[in-house]
Image: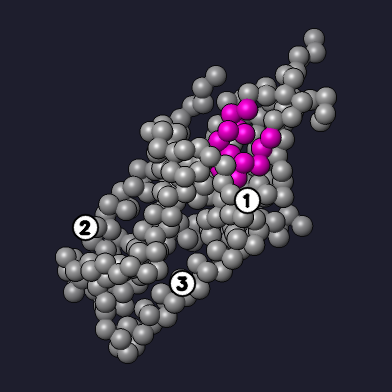
Amino acid sequence: MTKKRSFFDYMWIVSLSYLILGFFNILFAWLGMICFIVPLIISISGGGKSYCNNYCGRGQLLNLLGNKYKLSKNRDIPNFIKSKGFRYGFLVFFLTMFSNMIFITIQVFKQEKNLRQAITLLWTFKLPWNWIDVSMVSPWIAQFAFGFFSLMLTSTILGLITMRLYKPRSWCVYCPMGTMTQMISRARMK
Amino acid sequence: MKKRLSKKLAKVDRDYCVACGACKDECKFGAITIKQGVFALINGEKCVGCGKCSKICPASVIKMISREVS
């Protein structure tokens, strides 16, 4: 018995293209907002976790790398990662970092700070990202793009590490968007 | 004629299920649905007890149990 493939089974191509495009022009980072807004709209309007279940390109990409290309060790994820404390804690941490990024964008908008052409990986390592000309847009638009792409790259790295160490879609266990949409779905279910 | 059921059956720990849908994608028999985005629900009639969902589950919350126990 084989399942009929649909267009949405190829969302991993979109996810991969997004990561590649960011290296050529950081402004493409703005497109990542789709993965932030769409899951929330779906769950708020009663669609549950349809985004995770059907459209999430990152989940598909990790599944592909881990299962098809056998890059995953397929071990059980440690219990603490799937605990509610860790999942909600990581969500809070992620949202704090997101707010911090918005705060820096506002500072650049108000011209209190200069645009910093760098990507911060794992919230620690700053990589100069100055091969792209962003003078065609306002500095705050570029600053947001750098901040947002930092978040996207960081979460991809974390996803790849846990894909390698545990099951392919281990990222889904502690994905902040997944935790948030499940929270919304649970609240709607009651 | 009554359908013969498999000896094993998948069982989800709903408290820890993250409802990601990896199991739903893996199940070739359409035995899994994601209940309102909160947890995975196994249709016991359709489950053949192959264990693929249990193997793919990133949170390892699907266990294969004997039908008699269930």
Q: Are marks 3 and 1 on the same chain?
A: yes
* Position of residue A98 in the picture relative to residue A146 (left or right): right
On residue A97, which mark appears? 3
Residue B31 location (% of width, % of height): 66, 30
Bounds of the magenta segment: B51-63
Residue found at x 19% / y 69%:
A130
Which residue is labeled 1 in the image? A79
Q: Depth check: A17 or A77 in front? A: A77
Residue found at x 53% / y 60%:
A176
On residue A24, which mark appears? 2
For the residue marked with disc 2, what is the amino acid? Answer: Phe
| Picture quadrant of residue A76 | top right
Residue A80 location (% of width, % of height): 62, 55
Residue B22 can be seen in this image? no
| Picture quadrant of residue B24 | top right
Subunit of label 3 = A
Residue A175 location (% of width, % of height): 52, 55
* Position of residue B42 in the picture relative to residue A135 (left or right): right
Q: Are marks 3 and 1 in contact (CB under 8 Å)?
A: no
User: Real-space Cα distance between discs 2 and 1?
Assistant: 39 Å
For the residue marked with disc 3, what is the amino acid? Answer: Met
Identify whether B35 is placed above or below A181: above
Which quadrant, please, contains the N terminus of chain B?
A: top right
User: Real-space Cα distance between discs 3 and 2?
Assistant: 25 Å
Tell me the crowding category of disc 2: few under 14, some 14 to 19, or many 20 or more residues within 10 angstroms, Cα based.
Answer: few
User: Real-space Cα distance between discs 3 and 1?
Assistant: 25 Å
Tell me the crowding category of disc 1: few under 14, some 14 to 19, or many 20 or more residues within 10 angstroms, Cα based.
Answer: few
**Tag 1 secondary structure:** helix
**Tag 2 secondary structure:** helix
**Tag 3 secondary structure:** helix
